Image: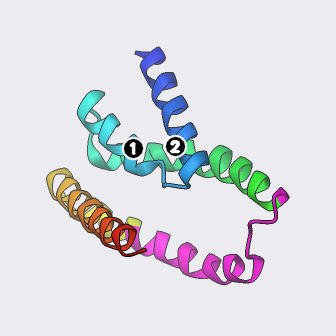
């Protein structure tokens, strides 16, 4: 099973670095449906796995290439910080099934949004 987690990490790392998607879009469903982890644990595990290594290393590469808007990035930090706290507190109150439903609806809306805007341009 450890090899499966390593392989999942490699696949997600490639996609995260390549297109900047949140690895949680890939890791969370895999942990829940392939590795049978409950939704809350999958989300917490994803945060510990993604934020330090992928976030830092991908950021360094994009920064080196001059592809970082420092002003916007720094303005986003307080909202992400406070939103992360609020979102995790809200998530603690939901049952795992409801969490999967909220996650699925969020992915669907984001996917639809991407399709619509990709077709326009």
Mark 1 neighbour density, 10 Å: few (under 14) some (14–19) many (20 or more): some
Which residue is under mark 1? 26
Left/right placement of residue 56 relative to residue 78 reads right
What residue sits 64% from the left and 76% below the top? 77
What residue sits 29% from the left and 35% below the top? 37
The quarter of the image holding the C terminus is: bottom left
What residue sits 74% from the left and 57% below the top? 62
Asked which colour scheme the image uses, the reply is: rainbow
Front-most of residues 1 and 119: 119
What residue sits 40% from the left and 65% below the top? 88
Q: Are marks 2 and 1 in contact (CB under 8 Å)?
A: yes
Q: Assess whether residue 59 is covered by the magenta stretch.
A: no
Q: Assess whether residue 66 is covered by the magenta stretch.
A: yes
Mark 2 neighbour density, 10 Å: few (under 14) some (14–19) many (20 or more): some
Front-most of residues 104 and 17: 17
Left/right placement of residue 95 relative to residue 120 reads left
Left/right placement of residue 48 relative to residue 44 reads right
Q: Quadrant of residue 65?
A: bottom right
Question: What residue span does the magenta drawing correspond to?
Answer: 64-87
Which residue is under mark 2? 15
């Amino acid at each position: 099973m450890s090899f499966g987690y390593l392989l999942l990490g490699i696949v997600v790392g490639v996609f995260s670095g390549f297109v900047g998607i949140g690895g949680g879009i890939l890791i969370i469903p895999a942990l829940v449906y392939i590795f049978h982890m409950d939704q809350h644990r999958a989300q917490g595990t994803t945060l510990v796995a993604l934020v330090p290594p992928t976030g830092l290393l991908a950021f360094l590469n994009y920064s080196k290439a001059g592809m970082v808007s420092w002003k916007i990035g720094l303005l986003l930090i307080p909202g992400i910080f406070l939103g992360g706290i609020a979102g995790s507190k809200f998530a603690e109150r939901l049952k795992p099934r409801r969490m999967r439903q909220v996650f699925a609806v969020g992915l669907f809306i984001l996917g639809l949004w991407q399709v619509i805007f990709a077709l326009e341009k």
